[in-house]
Image (cartoon, rainbow, N blue to C red):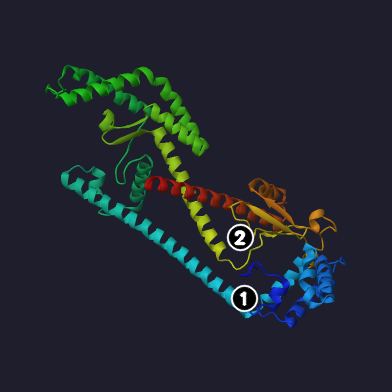
Amino acid sequence: PRLPDSGLSPSSLVRSDSYRVNEAQITRVIDDAFAAGEEDASGRECPEAAELQRAVSVLLAVHPTDVLKAYSRLRPSAKLALMNVLIDAACETKSVEQALNNIQTKKEDLLKAHDAEDREAKRKAKAEKEEIRSRLKAELESRRESGEATAEEMAGGEDINDAQVMFELHRQTEAEACGAPKGDKVAVLSRDELAKAESELAVTLELRTGGFDEYGIEMTGGALRQNERRRDEMRRRRDTLLGVREAAALQLRQAVSGGKRDELQAAVEAGQAAALEGSHENDGIGPGGRWVTSEMRDAYVALAELDKAETEELERARRWEQLEAVSGRSEMLGVDRYGRRYWTFEAVGGGNVAKLWVQPRTGDMLRVETSAPPDCGDASDAWQYYEGQEECSAVAASLDQRGIRERALQVAIRQHVHMSSLQRRAAEIQKEQDEADEMRIG
């Protein structure tokens, strides 16, 4: 358990009025610990009971004024055994009970807040769909009144079905991924459609170089200069971009297939350099507004999906970190086949780095794990510590998936490593945002 005062020593804990741990409580807990060691069904010595016996013998043998000095000379394992007993006794006090109740209340309030956030997100998603439904219905009515509706639209009912709403939502999401403002459309062209549009535009632009448009109207100076710029751009694309576009399109398809952010970003930059996207206002291509080729569309959508997944993962990490901050005790990740317990102790050290503590077999686990070998290496009687994604992942990989216990432990460790990575990424993003804010203020 995480006690409010992390600097407690045995003497201060016993004498503390806030915890009110009396001698009877300590004696009972110590007796229980010794009894646990004596009840070891395997017949093996319980190391914790032995350490506790040594610690108690030393402390009871000295004068009360020398207790602290005697305690300081105990082995770490003896101090730990004694501290375990004292903490067990302290946890039965009113102060700790009240503290744990307060922590539980905070945790419940936090879970309610998370639930409220989820409900609000669902409400917004539903409202967005209803907004799309209303807009589609208004557009349909407008087309019917103007006579622009198709025969199918004229024969259809008044309502917009869910499939139409989802299709429009998907189109809108794609348009936003391609850089269009919310509500605007993006024209998606195939490579053949782009080549045809550029070829037709090039002919029109060449005809206008005489100073008259296709209707025989004399062009103004500004229109003539714009025509010349577009004509020069079409010539450049025709003369220099054929091979470049082939390579960029291939790079885009491979990046989408691979799904890696850095490859997608590099492919998008290559596509931009190859003029696989543009806008009607700048180059005269497309029906109006922004346009992209299908390869660029797919790459932008893939990047948007990665952004969405990362945002969701970071949100899960944020909630997980919030819950960890109000946890009353560190949760055990699991137990391996040798009876060793695995802990994270998230509050220790900080730094958003994956950490694992492996606790040696205790008396209770020795009784339960009757099939465990008498000696499973040095880790059987000593704590082990692992730090970093690579080390913790290696521990997870070493576990046996065939066993229910170790399979669950493996999943828990990998989740811990993943969440630590997400927390680190969230901290990096926050740092980047803070630095950007400082630069703007400066």
Seen at 65% across and 78% down, the residue is 19
Residue 356 to residue 181: above or below? below
Residue behind mark 1 = 96
The three-letter code of the residue at mark 2 reads: Ala
Mark 2 vs mark 1: which is more N-terminal?
1
> Which quadrant does the N terminus fall into?
bottom right
Q: Does residue 385 appear left or right of residue 102 in this picture?
A: right
Could you tell me how far apart the alpha carbons at marks 2 and 1 are, in whole angstroms? 19 Å
Q: Does residue 299 appear left or right of residue 336 in this picture?
A: left
Residue nearest the observer in this picture, 18 or 371: 18
- Percent x, y for residue 340? 75, 59
Q: Does residue 74 appear left or right of residue 143 in this picture?
A: right
* Residue 347, numbered circle: 2
Residue 309 visible somewhere in the drawing = no
Residue at disc 2, secondary structure: loop
Tally of marks? 2
Residue at disc 1, secondary structure: helix
Q: Residue furthest front?
A: 65
Residue nearest the observer in this picture, 129 or 85: 85
Seen at 68% across and 75% down, the residue is 90
Residue nearest the observer in this picture, 194 or 8: 8
The three-letter code of the residue at mark 1 reads: Val
Residue 19 to residue 217: above or below? below
Q: Are marks 2 and 1 in contact (CB under 8 Å)?
A: no
- Percent x, y for residue 11? 72, 74
